[in-house]
Structure formats: structure tokens, C-alpha cells
Amino acid sequence: MKTVLITGATSGFGRDTARRFVAGGWRVIGTGRRQDRLQTLGEELGPQFHGIAFDITDREAMSAALASLPEDLAQIDLLINNAGLALGTTPAPDINLDDWMTMVDTNVKGLIAITQLLLPGLIARKGGIINIASTAGNWPYPGGNVYGATKAFVRQFSLNLRTDLHGTGVRVTVLEPGMAETEFTMVRTKGDAASSDSLYAGANPLTAEDMAETLHWIATQPAHVNINTLEVMPVSQSFAALRVHREG
């Protein structure tokens, strides 16, 4: 039985991905800050799920939690770097600088820290890494500023990591979802339900279940197949026209 570690497993993509992988016969280690949610998920999924609570921006807590894993669970075959967030939708001149720093700490520093910690084992087991970026890293939009920049980092880090791991048998993929309806926008708008609802109204966006199925598909390709990058949007979403500011 293979083992996958999924960061940010307490909601959204992470939670549904844990469900999908358990259904597919994997053992799942789910991480997140909210112990109560991990416990609830463990009660739902049974002994194939093991939750460990830590904040991915806290490197010492992360290292201690991973070091505490039972020996059989410590043999990780796949890392899914899902933990991440967006904060704020305002233009750069009006943004709260703390929000920018939190996005960098979580989406960039946390991701590279856990990846580096698990790399030796992943190399030894010829495992895999799937990093979740975003279409925001490829296509700019007003208010995307640092969030989009962090996801562009995730894309390039993934490509460079694959280059560094050439010949090891380790597979590396970056998955780039477009509009998806989860708790993500509630976090971004700091609890503004009306803004979240208006964004998704009538749009038929992607769901967490869609992304869980996609992640499982990537992970279960034959060992000689590597999905380098995969960008996924709902049919209702496409590419915005370039904006033009007109004087006078």
C-alpha cells in the first residue's frame, strides 16, 4: 500500500483529495493547522488516514511532526503540496503588507521547506511530488499581485525541481487550477460571504472533487509517465481581454 502526504488537508482540495486517495487504496497523511478538522476527517476515513497538526510556516513544528510519524507511515511515496492561500483582492497600493508576507511564507517558504525535508525519502522510493499552483501564476488580473507571483514561483520551482531530480525516478508535476469553489475565496475576502457568492454565481466553477480526481489520475499514471504541467479551468472561464486605459 502506497502512502501520500497531503498538506492543507482540513478543507477544500486537500480534504477531498484525502478522501479520493483513501478510496483508491492509499494510506493518507493529512496535515493542517486545525486539529479538530483532522480528527473529524480521521473518524470519517478510518485507519488509512493519519492526521498531523502543524502550521506549515513553522519549520520547527513541521520537522517535529514529521519526525514523530510511525515508521511504517514515514515511508512516503507521494507529496501533494496543497497548502496555500490568497489574502485580499485590492490593488498593490492599498494592500496590507502583512497579507503579502503571509502568502509568501505559506505558498512559497512552507512549500519548499516540506519538500526539502521529504526529498531524501522520495528519492529513495522513486516517489512523486505534485505541487498545486494556479492559473493566477500564468495569467495576471487586478488584485492578483503577490498571490499570482507566489503561484508563478510554484510553477517554476516545480520545473526546476524536475530538472534537479533527473535520473532519480522521482516524478514532479505542477497542477494549475482555475476558478474553483471552495473555502478559498472566503479566506481571501476574510469572511465576506456575499463577495464569495457573487464570484461563483452562475459560473459552474471547478469543485474540490474535480481536483481530487485530477490529482489521483496524475498519481496513478504508469511509472515511466510524468505529467509536467497541467492547467485546468471550468468551461465557463477563459482568457480576459487586455485592458486599455484611455485618457480624457
Image (tube, rainbow, N blue to C red):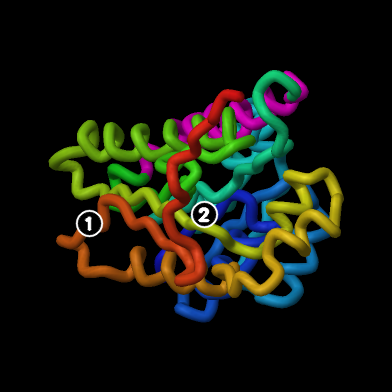
Q: Main secondary structure of the magenta part?
A: helix
Residues at marks 2 and 1, CA–CA distance in whole angstroms: 19 Å
Please name whichever residue, 127 or 16, is drawn nearer the observer in this view of the structure.
Answer: 16
Q: Considering the numbered disc 2 on the image, is that residue within a helix, a strand or a loop?
A: strand
**In the displayed structure, does residue 206 sit left or right of residue 174?**
right
Please name whichever residue, 15 or 47, is drawn nearer the observer in this view of the structure.
Answer: 15
Identity of the amino acid at label 2? Leu
Q: Is residue 230 magenta?
A: no
Which disc, if any, is residue 226? 1
**In the displayed structure, does residue 225 sit left or right of residue 132?**
left
Identity of the amino acid at label 1? Asn
Image position, residue 41 (x, y; %):
72, 68
For the magenta stretch, what is the residue range? Answer: 95-121
Picture residue at 66% right of the left edge, 75% below the top: 45
**In the displayed structure, does residue 5 sit left or right of residue 225?**
right
Please determine whether, in this image, residue 166 is positioned above or below residue 229.
Answer: above
Mark 1 residue crowding within 10 angstroms, few (<14) / some (14–19) / many (20+): some
Q: Residue furthest bottom?
A: 23
Picture residue at 75% right of the left edge, 22% below the top: 94
Image position, residue 166 (x, y; %):
16, 39
* Circle nearer the N terminus (2, 1): 2
Dividing the picture into quadrants, the one containing residue 110 is top right
Q: Which residue is mark 2?
A: 5
Of badges 2 and 1, nearer the viewer stands 1
Image quadrant for the N terminus? bottom left
Task: Tell me, yes or no, if residue 75 can be seen here.
Answer: no
